[in-house]
Structures are given as structure tokens and as C-alpha cells.
Image (cartoon, rainbow, N blue to C red):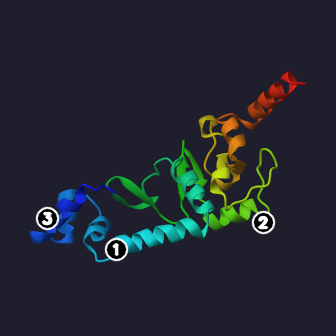
Amino acid sequence: MNKNLKPKILELREQGFTYDEIVEKLQCSKGTISYHLGEGVKEKTRQRTNKNRNSNPLRTKYHQFKTKTRKRPKMGEYTSTVKGILKLKRDHFATIEGKYCYMFTLDELIEHIGDNPKCYLTGKDIDLSKSRSYSLDHIIPRSKGGDSSLENCGLACREANQAKSDLSLEEFVSLCELVVNKFK
């Protein structure tokens, strides 16, 4: 959130501008204006954010996996734009390098991971409450044509995922075999 907007918003509101007029002048969302002008909105936002963060540690990983990898959808796949940010229609497909991929839900991810989460690379048990110990990995790396679909999402312990980097599974296994053979 742009902290430099607050004084401008307050000044325009004191001059009698409506929310819509402030949106037009500052090119920001009504939510941003409400955040700075509403009573107790900042505290409510902070509480909601903390509640969501603490409710399921996997939520943040899920959000990062989906958003940092999604390419711009085609026309008709989003509902609106605010300052160039697209809002996808719920349960729609996003295009990634010309391919469609279903944007799965958090519940679908939890079901995909199962009751006994394990690293798909090492088989090591993963404690989902310790979010720094694991990450969501693109099984087929995006750099090699992989998408952000549920089928291409793997739960991996942090060390293994960092070691794999953007290697394919075959390349990663070959590298591991080279390392093991060197120390036999």
C-alpha cells in the first residue's frame, strides 16, 4: 500500500471530494481510500490479516505459488482491473505460455497433499505448522514449460527444493547420483 497517498487522500477529502473523485484524481482503489478514512479500518485489516495468516500456514505458500507464477489471462477471463491488476473470475483458467491451467483452491491443495504430508523429493515427513521448513515446488519447472496446475504442484522440504532449483526431476536425480557416487 502506498503510504504517500494518505496525506493526499485526507487533503482531498477535507476539500469535499467524494470517494469516486479521489479515485479518479489519485488513480487508486476505493478500498485504499476507505482504509485511510474509515474508523478502525486499519486495526480490523491488521486483525483479519493475522487471523488468516495463523489459520492455515499453508495459505501463504499456496497464494505465493499461484500469484507469482500466473501470466496475464486473456480478455474475458477477468472481472475488472484496478491500476493494471487483474482480478480473475473465480474458478477460471489462466493462461501460461499459451496453455490453460486451472487455478486450484486451497482446499484442493490440502486434499492433494493428504493427511500425512511428505516431501515428494525425499519422502521426509513435513510439519505444515512450520512454514519455513517446506515450500510448494513446480515439479516440472516453469523454465522448462511447467504450469501452475495442481498436478504440477509438489510439497517439498526446503533443502531439497533449493537443491532442485529449476532442474527437471531427471536432471535432479542425475545430479544426486553424481554427488553420491563421488563420495562412495
Amino acid at pointer 3 = Glu
In front: label 2 or label 1: 1
Q: Residue at x 54, y 65 (%)?
A: 53
Q: Are marks 2 and 3 in contact (CB under 8 Å)?
A: no
Q: Quadrant of residue 83?
A: bottom left
Type of residue at label 2?
Asp
Mark positioned earlier in the residue sequence (2 or 3): 3
Question: Within 10 angstroms of label 2, few (less than 14), some, or many (20 or more) residues?
Answer: few
Looking at the picture, which amino acid does disc 1 mark?
Val
Q: Using the image as rendered, state which of residue 125 and residue 96 is in the foreground.
A: 125
**Image coords of residue 145 (percent x, y):** 62, 38
Q: Which residue is mark 3?
A: 11
Quadrant in which the N terminus appears? bottom left
Kindly give the residue lying farthest to the left in the view shown.
15
Q: Position of residue 47 (x, y in %)?
A: 45, 72
Q: Visible in this render: residue 172? A: yes
Which of marks 3 and 1 precedes in the sequence?
A: 3
Mark 2 or mark 1: whose residue is earlier in sequence: 1
| Residue 145 placement, left or right of 175 | left
Residue 65 appears at what percent x and percent y?
58, 52
- Label 1 residue SS: helix
- Crowding around mark 3 (Cα neighbors within 10 Å: few <14, some 14 to 19, many 20+) is few
Callout 2: SS = loop
Circle 1 packing at 10 Å, graded few (<14), some (14-19), many (20+), is: few
Q: Specify whether 146 is left or right of 5.
A: right
Instruction: Find disc 1 in the rendering and name its residue.
Output: 41
Seen as rendered, the residue at the extreme bottom is: 39
Q: Name the residue located 29 percent from the left edge and 77 percent from the top edge.
A: 39
Marks 2/1: CA–CA distance: 37 Å
Q: Which of labels 2 and 3 is toward the front?
A: 3
